[in-house]
Image: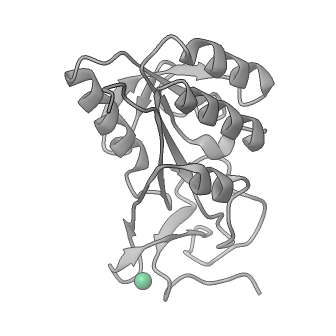
Amino acid sequence: MHAKKCGRLEVIAGPMFSGKTTELIRLLEREEYAGKTTVMFKPEVDNRYHERNVVTHKGASHEALVVSSGGRGLGQIEKLGKGFEVVGIDEAQFFRNGKELIRIADSLADMGKTVIVSLLNRSHLGEPFGDAPEMIARADYVRMLTAVCRKCGNDATFTQRVDQNGREIFGKLVEVEGKDSYEPRCRDCFVKPR
Ligand SMILES: [Zn+2]
């Protein structure tokens, strides 16, 4: 027996509006209360609320380092992440090289760090989102969150893209969470592309 604490890779997954960022902030704050040093990264593709702070739909916020969604940003996560005990990564699906992000998250966890990644697991077409399946498979802990179906109020695990009139549209992949043109849907109410 030895007391050395293991690192871990945790994933927070779910559809839009399921509170993934709120949960990530909650977990980071919990580690901070325990005296751990934390850092939170987010890709710069999503800067609709604030440059430095990650703000959720409900108004919770946490300081974050905004990094590019390309190779430079990933390099910063790898380099700066080493200096903290807990590393949070928000909206991970927006990093362009998901495989490289997975390698970095895995290696930080191997160093003994707690790495917590939030990501959208499905696209608005109902399909696995990019490298999310592999990130989930490599995680030690997975939290799968649900939203509330906009149509019927049941647990929503899908994200539907809709036009102004609420009709389903099937275009390119979702890029920015929080637009009016996306809504959470349950398995029953979700409409698959034809
Ligand atoms: Zn429904």
**Where, by quadrant of the figure, is residue 32 drawn?**
top left
Residue appearing at x 37%, y 51% in the figure: 19
**Residue 40: where, in percent of width, then height?**
47, 25
Q: Residue furthest left?
A: 33
| Scheme of colours in the image | one colour
Q: Is residue 118 left or right of residue 43?
A: left
**Where, by quadrant of the figure, is residue 46 drawn?**
top right
**Residue 124: where, in percent of width, then height?**
64, 67
Q: Is residue 8 above or below residue 16?
A: above
Q: Is residue 175 above or below residue 112?
A: below
Residue appearing at x 66%, y 30% in the figure: 104
Q: Nearer the viewer, residue 167 or 55?
A: 55
**Residue 165: where, in percent of width, then height?**
56, 74
Q: Nearer the viewer, residue 29 or 67?
A: 29
Q: Is residue 69 above or below residue 175?
A: above
Q: Is residue 185 left or right of residue 31?
A: right
Total labels: the figure holds: 0
Residue appearing at x 74%, y 58% in the figure: 173
Residue appearing at x 50%, y 10% in the figure: 83
On the rendering, which quadrant does ligand 1 occupy? bottom left
**Residue 143: where, in percent of width, then height?**
40, 56
Q: Is residue 103 left or right of residue 55?
A: right
In which quadrant is the N terminus drawn? top left
**Where, by quadrant of the figure, is residue 129 drawn?**
bottom right
In which quadrant is the C terminus drawn? bottom right
